[in-house]
């Protein structure tokens, strides 16, 4: 995963060119964790060395791995072909809801993102798909680029942070990763715009049921 940090290292150079000395908030959507870690880890390093930065991985409420899953040893795949890995997990037998952010429906999370979360370096957030699509539409109208449904989760979190900064009358630098365009995902936008999408939150009892499968596995 570490090679992905070229994203964060380049972001630092771009911020420098833009004349920004300090980043206040770093945001990325998380499926398995790679685009988020790529952007965030150079800033996690700064945070470990005393910088005040809120670093927010954003996931869907339908797959709340970091916000509702336990930190456990689990397999990375349903077929249990991988060794046990220490990570936040909803259980390797997790069956995701058919939301349109397909890339955010992984049951587990990258071990380093999990470790950083467990150590309190990250502040995970779970968002509903309707708020995310609304953010995606606003982004498309204002920036001229249609974001992927996965990416809209990060954008919705950016909008929340920007509104919070406005309310607090604080000027903040908010950095986020635009993980992909949504040209292949227009069906999701069509369903959102014609009122066919609903919010979905994975119920706690379903999570508990999934986790029975890994009861007795070693704990990190
Ligand atoms: C556009 C987009 N963003 C984000 C992700 C999430 O993946 P990861 O968390 O591994 O970066 C995906 C996965 O398919 C994706 O397609």
Image (cartoon, rainbow, N blue to C red):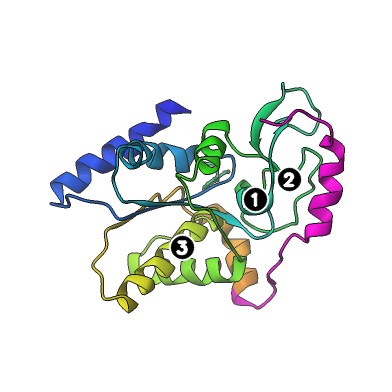
User: Which residue has dot 1 on it?
Assistant: 102
Q: Quadrant of residue 164?
A: bottom left
Depth check: 19 or 150 in front?
19
- Could you tell me which secondary element the residue under label 2 belongs to? loop
Residue at the image point whose x is 67% and y is 43% from the top: 106
The foreground one among 167 and 140 is 167
Q: Which residue is mark 3?
A: 157
Coordinates of residue 119 in the picture (x, y in percent): 50, 40
Check residue 93 for magenta coloring: no
Q: Which residues are magenta?
A: 193-220
Cα distance between the residues tagged 1 and 2: 16 Å
Label 3: how many Cα within 10 Å (few below 14, some 14–19, many 20+) = many
Which residue is tagged 2? 90
For the point 62% across and 53% down, the residue is 67
Q: Is residue 196 magenta?
A: yes
Residue 143, by quadrant, is bottom left
Residue 74 position by quadrant:
top right
Q: CA distance from mark 3 to mark 2?
A: 22 Å
Q: Is residue 60 above or below residue 7?
A: below
Label 1 vs 2, first from the N-terminus: 2
């Amino acid at each position: 995963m570490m090679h992905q940090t070229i994203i964060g290292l380049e972001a630092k150079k771009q911020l420098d060119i833009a004349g920004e000395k300090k980043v206040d908030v770093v945001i990325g959507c998380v499926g398995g964790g790679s685009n988020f870690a790529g952007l965030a880890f150079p800033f996690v390093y700064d945070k470990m060395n005393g910088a005040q930065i809120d670093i927010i991985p954003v996931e869907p409420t339908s797959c709340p791995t970091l916000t509702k899953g336990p930190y456990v040893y689990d397999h990375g795949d349903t077929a249990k072909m991988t060794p046990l890995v220490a990570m936040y997990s909803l259980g390797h037998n997790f069956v995701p809801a058919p939301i349109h952010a397909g890339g955010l429906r992984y049951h587990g999370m990258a071990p380093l993102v999990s470790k950083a979360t467990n150590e309190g370096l990250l502040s995970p957030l779970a968002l509903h798909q309707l708020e995310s699509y609304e953010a995606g539409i606003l982004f498309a109208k204002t920036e001229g680029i249609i974001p992927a449904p996965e990416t809209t989760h990060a954008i919705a979190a950016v909008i929340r942070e920007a509104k919070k900064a406005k309310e607090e009358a604080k000027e903040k630098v908010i950095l986020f990763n635009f993980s992909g365009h949504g040209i292949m995902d227009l069906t999701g936008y069509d369903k959102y715009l014609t009122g066919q999408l609903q919010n979905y939150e994975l119920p706690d009892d379903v999570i508990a049921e999934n986790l029975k499968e890994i009861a007795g596995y070693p704990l990190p």
